[in-house]
Amino acid sequence: MTEEERAEIELLVGIMPRRVAEAVRAKGFDGLIEVVLDLGRPPTARYQREEAPLDESEVTDLEIGQVVAQVSEFGEDNRAGIPRTLHRISAIRNRKGHIVGLTCRVGRSVSGSGHIMRDLIEAGRSVLLLGRPGVGKTTMLRDVARLLADELSKRVVIVDTSNEIGGDGDIPHRGIGRARRMQVPSPHRQHEVMIEAVENHTPEVVVIDEIGTAEEAEAARTIAERGVQLIGTAHGTTLSNLMQNPTLSDLIGGIESVTLSDEEARRRGTQKTVLERRAPPTFDVLIEIQSFDRLAIHDDVAATVDSLLRGYEVEAEVRVIGDGGQIATVERVPLRTTPQEPLEARPQVERRRTLAAAPGGPEKRVLPFGISRTHLERAIMETRSAARIVDSVREADAVLTLRPYYRRRSGPLKQAEERGIPIYVLRNNTSEQMERQLLA
């Protein structure tokens, strides 16, 4: 850690109660993610690999008040900051609106973190970043904005709803380079500011953090249709998650149910009612941030979504950043148009290729584990299968699950194997996949 980075973290630690600040300094700043101060509980520091108590004494109302007094005013989203830094202080309130808890999160500007996707953004393609909270979406987004503005000389406007990208205060943090930043008066008005940015400031690129509502998804589509490059993040961890999100699926083209003619259904070898992509995706490329140094890239969102909806297996390009900062592609497999087949079960389990072969008479009792119950109900209705969903292994004739759960073989899957109940593994959590399994 450089002295500059240490000095910036010290600005956050310096607003904390003295005993907490001293404990954090003694523990060290390396890997520090956030400090949690909850009324009536001991203060805690969260690091990348551990959670460490800082003191045995409970946090008092006075100590929380001391921290609140040193930061900017909390907005509607209960977030505040320290001017010209990237740190974020988030509040928990009681029913009366009084602050009873604080999460003091360390904000870091990591120059060079956006280079792993430089070829994609340099080509002018719109990129959507997904990932779990804390994985580094905003950090990467910030450096991409700097890279576009400083190294590629683009006109970049950041729509900064919670001041997380450009930092708190009216003067943005140096981490965004020459990119311009528009603050948002209220989180509910983010979609309005997105459109305003395009209409008033002639950007070549618009950068948005946390697209989370239908209005924001619609605004993103409007911007893309005007020929402006979009770089953004959304709530979700994988492309499959986004496809199942009715609010945000429009970012990848939207999903709708389509009734095919008899001839088309026969040609495709599918049911008459199928799911299809409704429109061109707003974003050309989707990146799943698996960890700060590992990305899974879907470089053709339209083709990937279409393949998933048809039940085909898709593979992403996986890029990693090595210890020396080198970027390597560890896996690059083209889309494969092979319909999914169930994995073979363990030797002690009776192997069956189809759910139709499950025991139990005319009506098959199916236990869904780790898959959408709603999707399975829809698949049973669409295929008119003689199947019924049950809630326990004891009642089941068969179990449907996904690969990640099958690999772990915990809970109900382990019980099913012990009882000799067939387990069928789907590649994707979609109704199309379930219909194929029910009809196979």
Image (cartoon, rainbow, N blue to C red):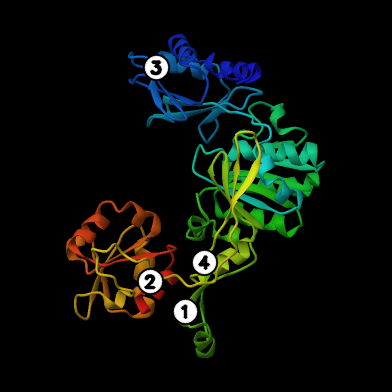
Which residue in the protein does label 3 denote?
54
Which residue in the protein does label 1 denote?
273
Q: Which of the numbered marks, if any, corresponds to residue 308?
A: 4
Q: Could you tell which of marks 4 and 1 lies nearer the N-terminus?
A: 1
Which residue in the protein does label 2 denote?
378
The image position of residue 58, as x and y in percent, is 34, 16
Q: Which amino acid does label 1 sit on?
A: Thr
Is 383 on the left or on the right of 363, as rendered? right
Q: Distance between the residues labelled 4 and 1?
A: 16 Å
Quarter of the figure with the N terminus: top right
Q: Image quarter for residue 305?
A: bottom right
Q: Which of marks 4 and 1 is in front?
A: 4
Badge 4: residue crowd in 10 Å (few <14, some 14–19, many ≥20): many
Is 37 on the left or on the right of 331, as rendered? left
Q: Distance between the residues labelled 2 and 1?
A: 11 Å
Front position in the image: 430 or 399: 399
Q: Distance between the residues labelled 3 and 2?
A: 51 Å
Q: Could you tell which of marks 2 and 4 lies nearer the N-terminus?
A: 4
Q: Image quarter for residue 71?
A: top right
Q: Do the residues labelled 1 and 3 touch (CB within 8 Å)?
A: no
Q: What residue type is labelled 3?
A: Leu
Q: What residue type is labelled 2?
A: Arg
